Image (cartoon, rainbow, N blue to C red):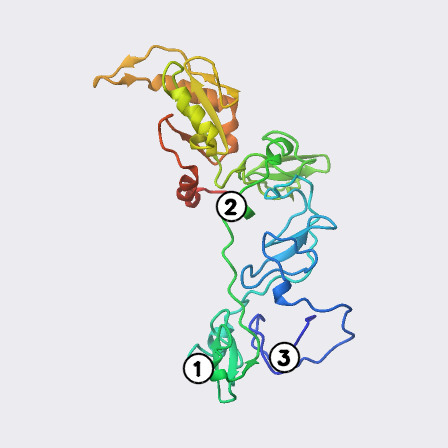
Amino acid sequence: MCRATCIPGAADPADVDPEAWSCRELGERSGGRPVGPEECRGAHDNCMASRCCKDPRDPGFACFTKNDTFARCMPECAPGPQYFDLDNGDPWSCHQVGAAALSTVGNWTETNCSGDADDCRESRCCATSGLQCYEVGGKSARCFASCPQEGGSPCTELGYRTPPPPTELPSGPLGGRVGRWVKDSCSKDGEDCSGTSCCVSGGMQCYEKDSAHATCADECHANSTWSCKKLGTRSWGLAVVGYPSLFCVTFLRVDSYEPALVEYQWKKSAGIFSCDNFSIFADRVTTIAGRETLETPSMEVEVTRDGTAGNAGIFMRAWEMLFTEGSLWDHDWTVKADPDAVLLPDRLRRRLEPLTDHPA
């Protein structure tokens, strides 16, 4: 195996087995200098120069290229546009440069390595993720996160540091949102996505039929007609503000206090305007938040038995209008909020994220 350093007689906890390394060199060392852990980059940084990803922050992440000048640490990469790319929809080459950050591969460390309270001079490894066996003052050795510096006694590292376990990958896009280019650059349902390799609707994957055609679907079963080759990655929808994506709608009356209240929310980017997209219905067409409102369906409002407005029919017709227009289908959730309701989309997203299902 190619590596910058090797400790003779020590087992590496990142290996699949507890066999110690002989460290016999085979061949010539490649040119250049090894990159130290402190030079590796995090998930949001350009890792092209270091060609490595931070450990323990991003165990299992590897550095993948977008082009000749930019690369990013991520768990995997499929060639094509990356939804989390906030700059543009240019395709990523997805060449892996450098090895993935270490993550524990096997369970042998639990039985073969030393516990936190044990002397680790014989095993020269630690059962607990992230710890290193340190010999202090030449008398004993224990597993610590860093040298304990007890009484000024020198520390000697024995064996390899046990890498952290793989991190739980985020349930949403890397960075928590997608680029605004997705709406106009990716393919909508029913369109040919062979030229874009990306889809607008959340949960959709671009599948190839043949060299001339592909479509966005939630799944694909290969047969004599469809190859079902995946182009790009699965869509996260239009989560341009945050994940999961919210499509918010409100209803107002023009001759009331409500338009001024909604305009104030618009200026403050609050309420429905903190959602990923929105629609406003009004009892007659007007302009609010820089766009024309949709006209609330006109029909007689009855009075219920308890004296309240029986407006269910109006809302049912309004929902039919939204279904037909189709923007709500590009988002994970649709939220209806009154103009004077206190809506905090960021908090709502945290509540809805565990309930948001995107097929893997």
Please name the residue that numbered disc 2 is placed on.
172
Q: Secondary structure at mark 3?
A: loop
State the separation of the CA atoms marked 2 and 1. Answer: 41 Å
Q: Nearer the viewer, residue 349 or 252?
A: 252
Sequence-first disc among 1 and 3: 3
Identity of the residue drawn at 61% across and 65% down: 38
- Mark 1, Cα crowd under 10 Å, few <14 / some 14-19 / many 20+, is some
> Looking at this view, is 173 or 288 the one in front?
288
- Relative to 30, residue 185 above or below: above
Residue 118 point in image, percent of width and height: 44, 82
Q: Residue at x 60, y 63 (%)?
A: 101
| Cα gap from disc 2 to disc 3, whole angstroms | 39 Å
Picture disc at residue 118: 1
Tell me what residue is drawn at x 70 percent, y 53 percent. 95
Whether pointer 2 and pointer 3 mark residues with C-beta atoms closer than 8 Å, the reply is: no
Amino acid on which disc 2 is placed: Gly
Secondary structure beneath disc 2? loop
Other-residue count near label 3 (Cα within 10 Å), few / some / many at <14 / 14–19 / ≥20: some
120 on left or right of 200? left
Decide: is 263 above or below 232.
above
Marks 1/3: CA distance? 21 Å
Residue at 69% across / 48% down in the picture? 66
Q: Is residue 206 above or below residue 50?
A: above
Mark 2 or mark 1: whose residue is earlier in sequence: 1
Say which amino acid is labelled 3: Ile
Q: Quadrant of the N terminus?
A: bottom right
Find disc 3 in the rendering and name its residue.
7
